[in-house]
Amino acid sequence: MSASPSSSLVFSASSPRVRKWPRSARSTSNLLVHFRRSFPIVLASSGNASSSVGTAMSTEMDAVSSFSEIVPDTVIFDDFEKFPPTAATVSSSLLLGICSLPDTKFKNAVETALANSECYEQGKSSDRMACFFNKALVNVGADLARLVPGRVSTEVDARLAYDTRGIINKVHELLRLYNEVEVSSERLLFKIPSTWQGIEASRLLEAEGIQTHLTFVYSFPQAAAAAQAGASVIQIFVGRIRDWARNHSGDPEIEAACKGGQDPGLALPIKAYNYIHKYGHKSKLMAAAIRNKQDLFDLLGVDYIIAPLKILQSLKESVTYPDEKYSYVRRLTPSSAKEYEFSDEELLKWDQRSLAAAMGPCAEELLASGLDGYINQTRRVEELFGKIWPPPNV
């Protein structure tokens, strides 16, 4: 099912909060949308860090897209020509956004979930609401899978963040529901918080062939442990780390980056990329919470870069010329990663104890904050379902 031109959903890839927007761009969600290129491809070399774009006139978007997949932080669904989606994330925030809109085709997916007889027969109210929630996630995810050619990432209940078996059981349950609506596992990712228990769940799920997306990564030990677990996607929030560093002190990892003359928000994805590629891990790296174009330029070569619409619009409107002095350079490459040096302490085989000891206050605080946001969103959805159930005509 595709969204109609009249839909006014706005999707956010990096924030669990629902924001208030004008009617033309109302209700946000946690939908991650990949950017389909709408310009001619720019010839580029990706063999080393000094490579730059070719000689044809193009836009900055063409130039940067030749090195990394650029992902809009928000997408207005009645603007497909500008930002046509190719992949998506379904989340508690998305469900809240759908329920707040007076008219969207996704609402039928939610109403169908609330009419599900399997959920209706659950004796306890909490079990009934959890069943409705899972059905709604999967129904919307299935609609998105029909809309986009890429993968759909589904949020796993953050209340299970410290329960490895609980995460695995939840993913199996969601996967069973997806199978019932004929969405194959190859089209799916499951978005899991990067606690130790979440990382261990990712390892076990990946061993089953189930693709995972680890989020809330705010430290190198988390990133390295996630890569060792074989997570398909690892998501790092550049701007949130920088914001924390501006207002706090006492984190050894951040202080080491600053002492070395690095921006702490950029230092982590750069180190994580080099670790993944130097040691042959399969994970793809996603840099989120990008705050300006320079952040994006400094991370060219990372697999996915999530950027706000205002940055993407600027990139799209800025023309580059063959004789332009500035070259758009791929900063991160597999070949340059081989030269990156890691300390013995960073090359541990990470386990629960070593991860807990090494995370630092920045990762601990931002992880806790992110989990609280997701948990609050989930509870709000369940409370809302309790108020509107049963739906009309059921």
Image (cartoon, helix red, strand yellow):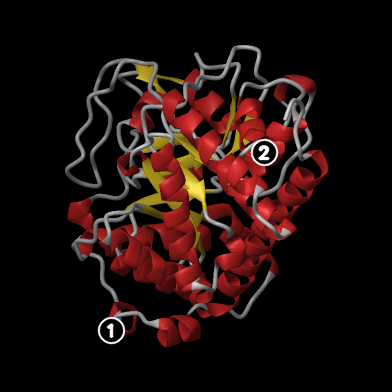
Q: Residue 355: x percent and y percent?
A: 44, 80
Q: Amino acid at mark 2?
A: Leu
Q: Residue 333: x percent and y percent?
A: 24, 50
Which label was assigned to residue 291? none
The count of marks equals: 2
Residue of label 1: 344
316 or 21: nearer the viewer: 21
Q: Residue 63: x percent and y percent?
A: 35, 28
Say above or below: 339 vs 51.
below
Q: Earlier in the sequence, mark 2 or mark 1?
A: 2
Residue of label 2: 114
Q: Amino acid at mark 1?
A: Asp
Quadrant in the picture for residue 214? bottom left
Element type at mark 2:
helix
Q: Residue 344: x percent and y percent?
A: 28, 84
Tell me the residue at 24%/24% (across/down).
54
